[in-house]
Amino acid sequence: MSTSGGGTGGWGGSGGEALLVVGDVVTDVVARHRAPLAPGTDTAADIRTLPGGAGANVACWAAHEGLVDVRILARVGTDSGDWHEEQLRRARVHAQVVRDDEVPTTTVISLVDATAERTFLTGSGAALRLSPGDWSPSLLDGVAHLHLSGYLFFADTSRETALIALRAARERSVTVSVDPASAGFIAGMGVGRFLEALAGVDVLLPNTDEARLLTGLPETADAAAKLSRQFPLVAATLGAGGALVAASGSVRARVPPASARAVDSTGAGDAFTGAFLAARLAGADEAQAAAAGCRAGAHAVTVMGGRPPFR
């Protein structure tokens, strides 16, 4: 894969132009509390139920950034399938949402404090039951790039599905990206096992905590550089510090943050990923794509939840 220059830089296979996301669609319950949580009693909060999921958020931000053909494969419960499909349609994402009649849609409770930092309580549900039977190689028809949500790698069934999709993409010379998704879940799975599962991925999109965990290095730049010896392109987000891009064992670009008044940091990394991928597919180089990602991430923290507002 080429990691520089104009055009799609080798992004694409089968003559396609679409972005396919295989990932998670979840129901987010976002609780924004200005005072510290008071154990054993009440804490006032602004609480909203919103559509979410790392994979779905990425797809919606890519569409918001102007990518015309964005698709997603995911699994939801029958309890809220219609609502989630409608939310994706309104975001201009072409959804193949598999209905699961045995378990409900995965729910995530996001506790957001006065600094906009969030803590997740993640429930089990349909998202990680995405199965090989839900996948078809025809889903790659017309696809230029496949993005896999890292959350899929933390359960046996969804990991098998993600690996089938990864192999199918490689056979068609379709580039593949992964966001590691959760430092906590990576630690539970084991770093070595997680990295082994990602063999063949072209683009890794970690945040600072994930990059450090995956390498054992304290500096994000060093961690990204090390990861880029295994993955051809690494775009690491630094929170309020912007982002950096590494390839072939060295940092190639550092991108400053975009200014924003943070309300809720939920989905900021997903916004970066969606905008980064959309920009690359539109012909931007890595630094330009990372700058687009930083702008989208800054936009994301100004609203509650992980999705862009509807245009």
Image (cartoon, rainbow, N blue to C red):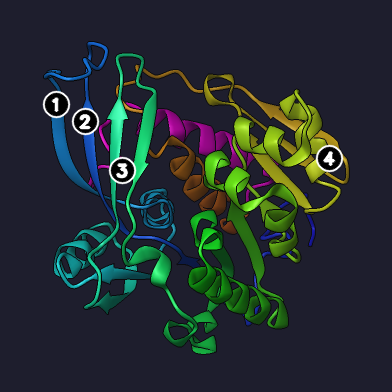
**Cβ–Cβ below 8 Å for labels 2 and 4?**
no
| Label 3 or label 2, whichever comes before in sequence order | 2
Q: Residue furthest front?
A: 40
Please say whether residue 293 is one of the residues in the magenta stretch. Answer: yes
- The amino acid at mark 4 is Lys
Q: Whole-percent x and y of residue 61?
A: 39, 49
**Cβ–Cβ below 8 Å for labels 2 and 1?**
yes
Label 1, on which residue? 46
Label 4, on which residue? 226
Label 3, on which residue? 308
- The amino acid at mark 3 is Pro
| 274 left or right, relative to 300 | right
At 65% from the left edge and 70% from the top edge, which residue is drawn?
A: 12
Q: Estimate how packed mark 1 is, as few (under 14), some (14 to 19) or many (20 or more) residues with alpha carbons within 10 Å.
A: few
Q: Nearer the viewer, residue 129 or 72?
A: 129
| Label 2 or label 1, whichever comes before in sequence order | 2
Point out the frontmost of discs 3 and 1. 1
| Label 2 or label 4, whichever comes before in sequence order | 2
CA–CA distance in space, label 2 to label 1: 6 Å
CA–CA distance in space, label 2 to label 4: 37 Å
Q: Whole-percent x and y of residue 241?
A: 59, 20
Q: Quadrant of residue 38?
A: top left
Which quadrant of the figure contains the N terminus?
bottom right
At 43% from the left edge and 52% from the top edge, which residue is drawn?
A: 58
Please say whether residue 297 is one of the residues in the magenta stretch. Answer: yes
Label 2, on which residue? 31
CA–CA distance in space, label 4 to label 1: 41 Å
| Label 3 or label 1, whichever comes before in sequence order | 1
Q: Whole-percent x and y of residue 87?
A: 21, 59
Point out the frontmost of discs 3 and 4. 4
Q: Which region shows up in magenta?
A: 284-311
